[in-house]
Amino acid sequence: MGALDRARPSVLRLRADQPAEELSRDLVDAWTHTEVALRSLLGGSTLGGPALIRALSVQGLLTLEQAHALVDFQAARSRAELPDYQPQGFDVEAARRGFAEIEKTLLLADESAARTSAAPAVAASTAPVGSARAGAPPVAAATSRRGPPSWLVIALGVILLAAVALLGYWLVGNRGGGTLAEGERLYANGDRNAARMAFVQAAKAEPENPLPHVYLGRIAREQGEFSVANQELATAIRLDPASPLALREMGSLMFATANYPLARNFYVRAIQVNPADSISLGYLGCTLARMGRPADGERFLRRAGEGPWSNCLSPAPGQPAGAMSAPGRTN
């Protein structure tokens, strides 16, 4: 609990009305110490971020709810390190919720360890006195009903899991030309939940392909799950820093959260890669107008031509409706 105790002051200071620089510093500090506490659950580890959370989940040390809360916490910390990013109220909530979940997990682990260490002493104190004759040899443990060796049980479990995964991949991957194509079809038909499952499978099948993460980020943004969207899009940009689709989607996420300076940066980067990207051009115009630069905004809106961005200059900020035409392999 030592590392968690060091994180607690930063977590307690978190407030949405903190100066942005202080709030970013506290978010980073809180996660840094929390990550040390998470590693202690594995007995020490070099893993960090989502990989560490995934390892803890695989070991059964985190519930699905706890893992999601910690992913949101880590994503808030990642956003806090982005240049020009202004932490939001949902970042504060994500950090507090994630901290509460790991605190609960570590308390349960400490209690379990205490019970385990106390068990041998209790067993020794309750053993009947004189239960064995002096000099009598110990009774051999019965071996006739011994179960299969532990290595065999583990091996069979791994084989079973692999078979289930392959079956799932075959069932999804053999419909409509693969999981990515199937996800694109489902998304185009408006079935976001099924599309999301297909894109998760596609991301596993093609770990170096940024496109499944672009779609996952878009779906999360459209459903208001901004932390998840940021995590997926950051992964897509890490896999391909020059992907115009990933850069555009991150711009739209920043636009949806009214972080216009950062939205401008990502739209500009998308246009630098693909100068003909009318969607990025249009929403860059909207972004500049929202930043108090209407003349510059109008210039980019003219370059973009007519589109769903054409009426974006209304006063109320929000998610750019229809901003993202479905990202295909050619657009």
Image (spheres, helix red, strand yellow):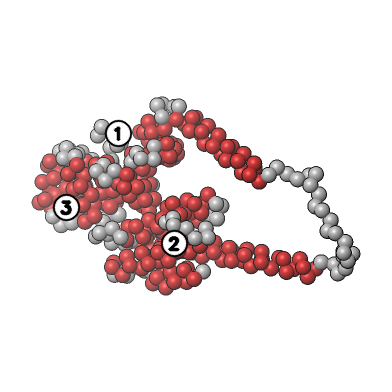
Residue type at the position of mark 3: Ala
SS under mark 3: helix
SS under mark 1: loop
Residue type at the position of mark 2: Glu
Q: Residue at x 41, y 32 (%)?
A: 179
Q: Name the mark on residue 328.
A: 1
Residue 265 visible at all: yes
Of the image marks 2 and 1, the number of the one nearer the N terminus: 2
SS under mark 2: helix
Mark 1–mark 3 distance (CA, rounded to whole Å): 29 Å
- Mark 3: give few (<14), some (14-19) or many (20+) Cα within 10 Å: many
- Mark 1: give few (<14), some (14-19) or many (20+) Cα within 10 Å: few
Q: Residue at x 80, y 44 (%)?
A: 144
- Mark 2: give few (<14), some (14-19) or many (20+) Cα within 10 Å: many
Locate residue 4, reporting x and y percent.
47, 68
Q: Which quarter of the rendered picture does the C terminus lie within?
A: top left
Most extreme residue toward the right is 133
Residue 22, quarter of picture: bottom left
Q: Residue at x 12, y 47 (%)?
A: 298
- Judge from the rendering whether residue 320 lies leftward or rightward of residue 4; answer left or right: left
For label 2, the residue is 35
Residue type at the position of mark 1: Gly
Q: Residue at x 55, y 34 (%)?
A: 163
Q: Name the mark on residue 289.
A: 3
* Dots 2, 1 in contact, CB < 8 A: no
The one nearer the camera, 43 or 36, is 43
Mark 2–mark 3 distance (CA, rounded to whole Å): 40 Å
Q: How many marks?
A: 3
Locate residue 62, reporting x and y percent.
53, 55
Of the image marks 2 and 3, the number of the one nearer the N terminus: 2
The one nearer the camera, 277 or 137, is 137
Residue 303, quarter of picture: top left
